[in-house]
Image (tube, grey):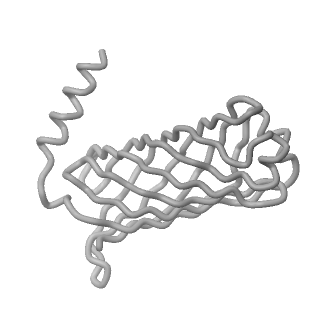
Amino acid sequence: MFRRTLLATALLAATATTASAGSYLSLGLGGDPVLSGELSAAADGDAGGNGRLAVGQRFGRLALEGSLSRFGLATEQATAAGVHVRLTLPLDGALGAYGRLGLERVWLGAEGDRLGDRTADGMVGGVGLEYRLEAPLLGQAALWAEVSQNKLDTEAGEVGVRLWTLGLSVGL
């Protein structure tokens, strides 16, 4: 099964056009995080929204991204730094779907003290839709919407953070 998935991914990447290659900067904002595990108990109270800044390099349909993101907890903001691989599949014209998978380190602040660990490492996965467009001043750009899920390991066990984010990417 894994070999078939790897072969399909390689085939999709090989059939991509070079017109979609290039660097980009992406900024997204979203709603309150949905917390799970011990993190939901440690961060009881009003959360805040979320935001994500990413820099990426496209290689056809595949992209490699580095990101910084923040999401609200009860008393502070958690900060995450990550590296992700993203695969985009065209749906219809300028509309595409994508999946994102990566590794992240998260700094939890005061809520981390309640979990016995101010930092957590883990994986993040996301799925989204993007609409690519040509902007007169921006060049290549895309509007996107994504739902992502973080799974993080702490001293208190595995915790999770689900985020929804809307954003804009512009070519560099």
In this view, 126 is above or below 21: above
Residue 25: percent from left, percent from top? 38, 68
Closest to the observer: 53 or 109? 109
Residue 15: percent from left, percent from top? 11, 42
Residue at image x 84%, y 59%? 75
| Residue 126 falls left or right of residue 172 | right
| Residue 84 falls left or right of residue 63 | right
In this view, 147 is above or below 151: below
Quadrant position of residue 79: bottom right
Closest to the observer: 95 or 153? 153
The image quadrant where one finds the C terminus is bottom left
| Residue 27 falls left or right of residue 2 | right
Residue at image x 81%, y 49%? 111
Residue at image x 59%, y 62%? 51
In this view, 89 is above or below 155: below
Quadrant position of residue 157: top right
Residue 155: percent from left, percent from top? 74, 33
Closest to the observer: 138 or 172? 172
Number of numbered discs overlaid on the protein picture: 0
- The residue positioned farthest toward the top in the image shown: 1
Residue at image x 39%, y 64%? 55
The image quadrant where one finds the N terminus is top left
- The residue positioned farthest toward the right in the image shown: 45
